[in-house]
Amino acid sequence: MKKAQKPLCLFKRFGAAALALSLFGCSQAGAPSQSLPASSAVLSEEAPQVQSIPSGTQMSEDELFQLAADLIAQGQALDDQAAVPSLWELDKEDSFTEDLYGQSIVFYHLPSVQGKARLRQMLSEVFSKAYTDEMLQEFFSPDAVCALRERDGKLYASENWLFRQAPLRQYTGKLTLIGRTEDVVSLQAELSYQGGTVQMLENYPLTLRREENGWKIDGWKSEMSADNSFVQLPPELEQAAGDDPELATSLRYAWTLGDALARGEQRWVDWCFSGLFEAPASYQELGYPLKDITGLKVTGYGVETGPDGAVYLRLDVDDPGATPLRAGSNWYLLAFGRDIDRVDGVIQRMYPDSEQAAFGLGRAPESEEAAALSRELTSVAGLFRNWASSGPAGKDWWKSSESDLPAEVPYVVVRMAQDGRTDEEGRFTAEEFQQAAREYLDEPDYTVDRDSLRQRCDEQDGRFALMPMGGFLSDIDLVCRDLGGSLAGGAATVVRRYYRDELGLVPDYDLVYTLHRSLGGNGSWCVSKCTKQPFGAESVQ
């Protein structure tokens, strides 16, 4: 999964945005220098000499910690200056207005600001070029209300820019080395914040990068991005990653997980799922199922990529010990992304591949025809679950709905839109809806009147469009997935599995959808029934 969409007001990113504000009016002499002379020397752009800057592998662990502490001190000094009120006095005689989201936003000149170029220069003294570019892109975003503008070499700020959220977290000075290369150092840094009357402590990743003019911080405070390039992959996996940095990151976590499980290294197992030397947070019934690998005996492992870019891990388990891992040689489909309290790109799920193999899918699919049929069936079941019924239901679910509004209308309209049976604006006639409903509901005598449609749709010039609404959200925060769909004897089945743990290792129950072709076998797929089946010996294994 990629990063969550950034909030409209930039200061909700805690450290980075608030820190950058402090750069206005801050002189170069005001920031402390790095304690390692070679790593902090400012080199000219005409003759960059990265080689004169100590690499991450040349420095001792104590020197790395001191370097990080000095860079943090520079950033924190700027953070502290952000609270000085005199820096944010606006010249309200010099302003202009922009229309954003139906509002007139006034931008005022900041007299203490020396220009965007100066802001970039000050940011780049502490932060990496990539992170500096990211921050500036956010600060000057044309779509943000809480933002900056530059005109004629002068900077302007909206009044929203001043109502920033003060940085809540502070570095405590406790650092742990995770890994390093010549140009990257990956650390775990402890931060503190006030949680009511209690002082709270949390760990976050901290990445240092060696650039032409010294070591820089790549991120700040509660940023959850990290760098795992210190993990060395076998040549065949390096080749598989190619020029895809996201795939390379995934493969490094996968390879490290296999190695850590084989060596019994609990903290490295945890790192693969949280990006830190600590277990990830979990809100599932059984929580994080690899928090105790006592007794686990893994005698071999391997990593492969599928044609669709999926990453699979093979574990040869002699004894699962206290874990729910399966004995013998088994493949697992790994899913990557970001969640609460997890670093970007870490492993989120670890699904047994055999569950999808039962449908001719997974790591070794039987055929493209089987995969295409499964996609078609699971799509119909997914629409039914999101727009008709989120749980067990029968064929006439819409007749027994507890809703005071016609329950079938949203489901039918969404299917019409997916099948291209509406116009470009999503509109349709009552006759078109009725014809589609007879097919999607497998109800040849179904009729609809305009008053019923008006309860769910807007009408314009005799054509209807579904009112803005969302589907069922019952699967949010649950660990679940579609295992697949198959056809046997004219009847189709789709299985959606729900798990009791965070990783998808311990099945709980299945929603089993039975589908058939409507209109006597000549129409579309429609759901005959949905049943809930507890996981047991008869379930897909």
Image (tube, helix red, strand yellow):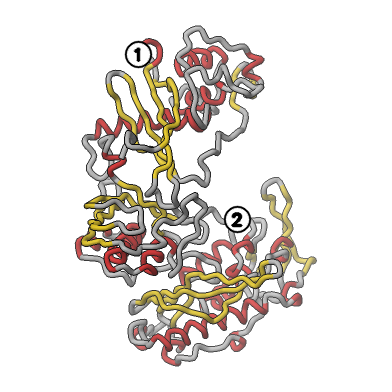
Q: Which residue lies furthest to the right in this view?
A: 93
Residue 287, percent across and down? Answer: 47, 54
Which residue is pictured at 39% across the width and 22% down the height? 515
Residue neighbourhood size for the residue with mark 2, other residues' Cα within 10 Å, grouped as few (<14), some (14–19), many (≥20): few
Which residue is pictured at 41% across the width and 41% down the height? 481
Which residue is pictured at 76% across the width and 69% down the height? 90
| Numbered mark located on residue 521 in the image | 1
Residue 154 seen in this snapshot: no
Residue in the foreground of this view, choosing between 425 and 445: 445
Is 319 displayed left or right of 116 in the figure?
A: left
Which residue is pictured at 45% across the width and 54% down the height? 2
Looking at the picture, does residue 254 appear above or below residue 453?
below
Looking at the picture, does residue 259 appear above or below residue 41?
above
Q: Name the residue under label 2.
A: 7
Tell me the SS state at disc 2. loop
Q: What residue type is labelled 1?
A: Gly
Residue 73 seen in this snapshot: yes
How many numbered marks appear? 2
Residue in the foreground of this view, choosing between 329 and 468: 329
Looking at the picture, does residue 396 appear above or below residue 379?
above
